Amino acid sequence: MVERIEDLNLPNAVISRLLKEALPDGANVSKEARAAIARAASVFVIFLTSTSTSLARKQNHKTITASNILDALKQLEFESFVDPLTKDLDAYRKVVKDKKDKAKKDSAVAENGDKDAA
């Protein structure tokens, strides 16, 4: 499955960017602290994924859904994460829907333009 445990860590660039956004300007984080945060974040993601997988399997699903993730957060006593994540998920879904709607509209306009040219 995984050859080295380090392969499970989140990318250092992602961790650095998140730390930079979360901390005030001028704050520094040592290399060891950054590594510890990356490892802790990876363990949390693995733990959440494992719990979500168990919940999905109990429902005879092979795919983990956002609902499984939110339910797992509640089960793991991270209820305070659920509302903000639900709001972000709703906003993400709206953006995706708007993009699809725009693409369909642009496609329909292009097709009508081709018909008018013929």
Image: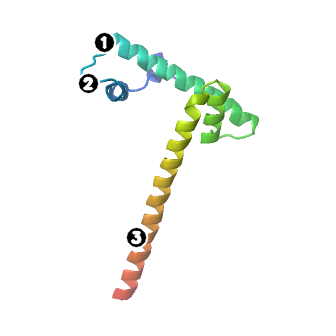
**Quadrant hosting residue 36:** top left
Depth check: give the residue in front, 84 or 93.
84
Q: Residues within 10 Å of mark 1 (few under 14, many from 20)?
A: few
Residue at image point 46% right, 53% down? 95
Q: Residue furthest top?
A: 32
Residue 16, quarter of the rendered image: top left
**Pair 2/1: label in front:** 2
| Location of the C terminus (image quadrant) | bottom left
Relative placement, left or right, of 31 versus 91 is: left
> Residue at label 3?
106
Per the model, the C-alpha gap separating discs 3 and 1 is 49 Å
- Residue at 62 percent across and 38 percent down: it is 64
In this view of the protein, which residue sits in the foreground, 115 or 30?
30
Which quadrant: the N terminus? top right
**2 or 3: tag closer to the N-terminus:** 2
Closer-to-camera residue (4/44): 44
In this image, 61 relative to 79: left or right?
Answer: right
Tell me the residue that label 2 is attached to: 25
Q: Which residue is mark 1?
A: 30
